[in-house]
Amino acid sequence: MSSYRIILSGGGTGGHIYPAIAIANELKARHPNAELLFVGAKDRMEMEKVPQAGYKIVGLWISGIQRKLTLKNLLFPFKLMNSLWRAKNIIRNFKPDVSIGTGGFASGPLLKVATSMGIPSLIQEQNSYPGITNKLLAKKVDKICVAYDKLDRFFPSEKLIKTGNPVRQDLLDINTKADEGFEYFDLLKGKKTLLVVGGSLGAKRVNELISSELDFFNTHNIQVIWQCGKLYHETYKMSGHNKHVQVHAFLNRMDLAYAVADIIISRAGASSVSELCIVGKPVIFIPSPNVAEDHQTKNALSIVDKNAAVMIKESDLDVDFENKFKQLLASKEKQKQLAENIKKLALVDATKQIADEVDKLLNK
């Protein structure tokens, strides 16, 4: 049985970490004797999440460049040189057969060194507008797995493989889980259910909106599952004393939350968008304007342009939210149309297809 050595890097946010873990899980299932090593950025969430998933991780002293002049920016050249040196030592010691990057600070130095040492390399780009790390790596790597069309604007077309983004496998059968979901969340079956998700840390403006609209939802006989994020739970947990509102820092059973939802309000991070395509429910995207190159807006528009979701910019929430929400709530036809159209965009075999491409590199 093959005992490959595989090195993976991706981090900074869950959107980079969880795809890397999903790819690792698939490769480990295919090659039980393989040795896998993650490389992350020190003090970022991957240093906690990757060991929780059962994998070893080592850290680089690296961070991104801030938009304004800060001490961190002045340190960046030193961090980069240190990370390149450390990455070279890690690769020399580990001797990987293949290197995989899913974006984020640490994957830049690691993949740069790996490609310069002739190690077969693959990157996975989650967004419709690529991050700077993957754009810089594109010329050197062997393969680029993407989730959206028209990325040949940024990457060499001969290296592109459209696979989609890795997602949780428990979302593939949510249609059978509604009864379990109503019991798990103690919800009323005859009542419309709104699910609000703003990411693991939470989304400040989305939380402010939901807090201000609780009476509006109650008036329209809607029960709310509100994942406000751990940073905001103390602020909003008292809203959960309302009979029709549940406030959660995290949702451990996202499959059940999706199963009971009639309408979903969500940020538009790449992983969330990919999940929502598989879930196939009416979605209102509120993209974060505070991310690099405004890529959440671009992610959302790639769905909205196919008449598969509604989008409201943060700057338009006060004016547009209630009208757009009422229009969607009132039209069963519109809900059905959005659900059917977004489902058509789902790429359910992404993890397996990415692992297939890794296997091709391993078998070269």
Image (cartoon, rainbow, N blue to C red):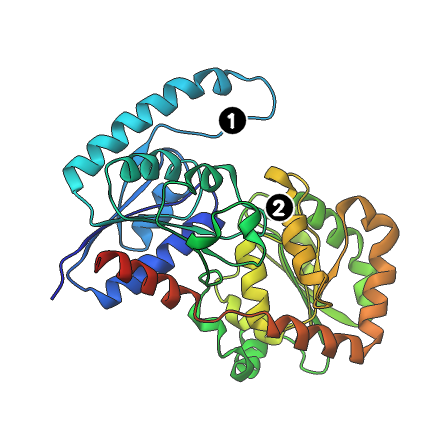
Q: Quadrant of the N terminus?
A: bottom left
| 228 or 26: nearer the viewer | 26
| 267 or 23: nearer the viewer | 23
Number of residue marks:
2
Residue type of the residue flagged with mark 1: Ile
- The reply, left or right, for residue 304 in relation to residue 169 is right
Q: Residues within 10 Å of mark 1 (few under 14, many from 20)?
A: some
Q: Which residue is painted at 21% across and 38% down in the image?
A: 91
Compared with residue 71, is residue 92 higher up or lower down, i.e. above or below?
A: below
Find residue 339 and report its horizontal and vertical position in percent. Answer: 67, 75
Name the mark on residue 65: 1
Find residue 37 and report its horizontal and vertical position in percent. Answer: 24, 47
**Secondary structure category for the residue under label 1:** loop
Find residue 327 and report its horizontal and vertical position in percent. Answer: 85, 68
- For the question of whether residue 185 can be seen, the reply is no
**Secondary structure category for the residue under label 2:** helix
Find residue 319 and report its horizontal and vertical position in percent. Answer: 88, 50
Residue 77, quarter of the rendered image: top left
Q: Quadrant of the C terminus?
A: bottom left
| 256 or 21: nearer the viewer | 21
- The reply, left or right, for residue 363 in relation to residue 159 is left
Q: Are dots 1 and 2 in contact, CB under 8 Å?
A: no
Q: Which residue is painted at 58% across and 52% down in the image?
A: 128
Going from N to C along the chain, the mark reached first, 1 or 2, is: 1
Identify the residue under disc 2. Answer: 295
